[in-house]
Image: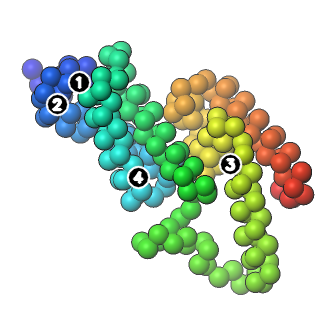
Amino acid sequence: MQLNKISDQKLLKQYVQGNEACLEMLINRHKDRIFTTIYLIVKDSYIAEDLFQETFIKVIKNLKKKKYNEEGKFLPWVTRIARNLAIDHFRKKQRMPMVTDSHGDDVFRKMKISTETREQTIIRTEREDEVRRMINQLPDEQRQVLILRHYGELSFKEIADLTDVSINTALGRMRYALNNLRKLMEHSHIKA
């Protein structure tokens, strides 16, 4: 039997029985899709690599604790773990995704915008920080869809697939997120 024809379930079963090489085959089989899922959310290859490794550490721990039910859905399970770790990354930082240079500094904060005075820069920065705080006040499901759509630039189909909901549910969550964000902004007197 060819290795690429062995099902995920058989590889998992053999891994749990002690065959470490089977996990390596599973990782190699699905690494591109998992890494891409993470990268689309964080938009930083260094962070994506760290989260990819963290994903499989969590997978190994869950498999050893027998927390995986064999339902033939290994890839969606791992994808969900990867997605949750990527989103948790933003929660821990309590900030929005940013483009960083090799030193981890925000590229856009370094750029000099010639038409903007120092006072305008301070006001813009304060407004961005306030909007970030408001986004963090949204319910988890709404915040998740907003971040994936606006900052991750994912389609609603991709968001629906990643979050295991219908496209209509993803659209509804986005609509509620925008409405709630608008209300928070009006309450704080911030203009969109």
Q: Say few, some or many: other residues with alpha carbon within 10 Å of mark 1 (under 14 / 14 to 19 / 20 or more).
A: many
Q: CA distance from mark 2 to mark 3?
A: 40 Å
What residue type is disc 4 on? Ala
Q: Position of residue 142 (x, y in %)?
A: 68, 37
Disc 1, disc 3: CB below 8 Å? no
Q: Position of residue 140 (x, y in %)?
A: 64, 37
Of 146 and 156, nearer the camera is: 146
* The quadrant where residue 66 appears: top left
Q: Residues within 10 Å of mark 3 (few under 14, many from 20)?
A: some
Q: Which mark is residue 22?
A: 2
Disc with the residue nearer the chain's start (4 vs 2): 2
162 sits left or right of 3 in the view: right
Q: Residue at x 39, y 59 (%)?
A: 46
- CB contact under 8 Å: marks 1 and 2: yes
Q: Does dot 4 land on a helix, a strand or a loop?
A: helix
- Kindly report the distance in space between the C-alpha atoms of the residues bearing marks 3 and 4: 22 Å
In the image: residue 37, left or right of residue 151: left
The amino acid pointed to by label 3 is Asn
Looking at the picture, which amino acid does disc 2 mark? Cys
The x and y percentages for residue 109 are 61, 74
Label annotation for residue 48: 4
